[in-house]
Amino acid sequence: MKHNALLKVIFSRRMLTTFMMGYACGLPYDLTKTVLKAWMSDAGVDLAVIGLYTLVGLPYALKFLWAPLLDRFTFSMMGRRRGWMLLFQLALMLAIISMGASDPAGSPWMLAAAAFLVTFFSASQDIVVDAYRREDLAEAELGLGSSIYFYGYRIGMLVAGSGGMILSDQISFQMVYIILAACLLPGILTTFLTPEPPMVHGRPRNFTETVVEPFLEYFSRRGALWMLAFILMYKLGDNIAAAMTTPFYLDIGFSKTEIGAMVKLFGFWAISAGGLIGGIMMLKLGIYRCLWIFGILQAVSTAGFAVLAQLGDYLPGLAGVVVFENFSAGMGTAAFMAFMASITNQKFTATQYALLTSLMRIPDVGISSLSGFMAGHMGWFWFFVFCALCAIPGLLMLFKFAPWRQQQAAAQIL
């Protein structure tokens, strides 16, 4: 296909749905990260405690435990995927409002409980949306679809992160969370309007097919363990660094408005461009080669934070680091998501994709929970140098199952 065919695919109903579902998944994700940590910093909560709050994200790492139920059962007349999506989206709105009604200094455990519910319903929505995207898109559209999903995801994060940070300078955090809960309505509307994807390969019929076979089918493949190790390690350094960027920006002297405007809004265009360019590059080079290129760029961009730690609150330096880091992260995440989608069996889409993305989240909620202690003891410069070096093991694993010369077939859209 040529230029017109590519445009037709990009502006199709499937890609618009993918974009809107990405937005619906990205918005709640940042509410328990950037906005919550800024709120806690404002309330005078200790840096180490802020790092420990990363543990409320455990549902993102454990969602494979209940994903089989979402493959097996249908919740409503709307269908297997859309019915569960609607339930989790409505529950998310209520949980976000409850989170905003908490007090980080006076009732930290209540806030933690509300934040945990937000991440649980958000992770559950992710399970269903990932399965929907895998089943709705054609094989040739997975790379581009992952990029467009990521584009929508970042817009959701922009609304929550940038919008939430800027609003918090004008109104209370309680009102901010109510407004952001209402921002989930476009995702709910999309769930009502989009069609249910066909079950080409059927669905699990009993306990064995629901719980056992998805894992047996995956682990019977050659190199399955190497792929899991790669998924665990590929974005390790990037995840550890991301857990502390907001306290880092505040600590070296930037205001919340500067963070909201420069880091979130300015960085958004860079990460969006990276995701889109990454999707097009995957059509040309294949997923495997792009994993090499984008992984190296991610490591170098993480080291850029160490440079910023030396520069301090220097806005041009912040702009350069943010643009480079977000651009490379956009490309790397798009390739990573396309890779995980490509190795799932469509009969067990929700379960297998949840397993893979759960592994991806383990460093985020495990090692990253210690990031506050690490930054406090290492200092910001050496902390970010360490994060950059953490990318090396994931890249070395590519020699095992994705050597440069072994080019995976690219989608035939261009």
Image (spheres, grey):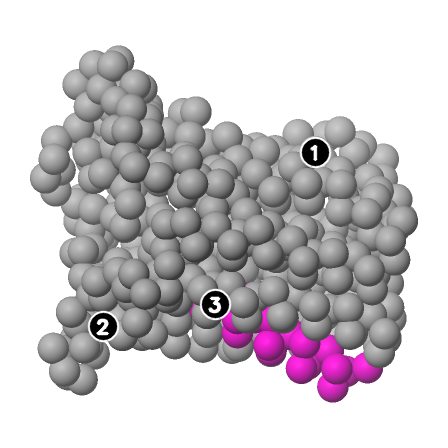
Magenta span: chief secondary structure = helix
* Dot 3 amino acid type: Phe
In the figure, residue 13 lies in which quadrant? Answer: bottom left
Q: Is residue 297 above or below residue 247?
A: below
Mark 1 to mark 3 CA distance (whole Å)? 35 Å
Q: Which residue is mark 1?
A: 112
Q: Is residue 65 left or right of residue 106?
A: left
**Of callouts 3 and 2, which one flags the residue occurring earlier in the amino acid sequence?**
2
Q: Which residue is mark 3?
A: 294
User: Is residue 383 or residue 207 the one in the foreground?
Assistant: 383
SS under mark 3:
helix
Residue at the outermost top position: 207
**Of callouts 1 and 3, which one flags the residue occurring earlier in the amino acid sequence?**
1
In the rendered structure, are the residues bearing label 1 and label 3 in contact, judged by CB atoms less than 8 Å apart?
no
**Residue 28 is covered by the magenta coloring:** no
Residue 241 is tagged as none
The residue lying at 48 percent from left, 41 percent from top is 229
* Dot 2 amino acid type: Phe
Q: Badge 3: few (under 14), some or many (20 or more) residues near its Cα, within 10 Å?
A: many
> Marks 1 and 3: which is nearer the front?
3
SS under mark 1:
helix
**Of callouts 2 and 1, which one flags the residue occurring earlier in the amino acid sequence?**
2
Q: Which residue is mark 2?
A: 11
User: Is residue 374 or residue 246 the one in the foreground?
Assistant: 374
Q: Which residues are magenta?
A: 314-331
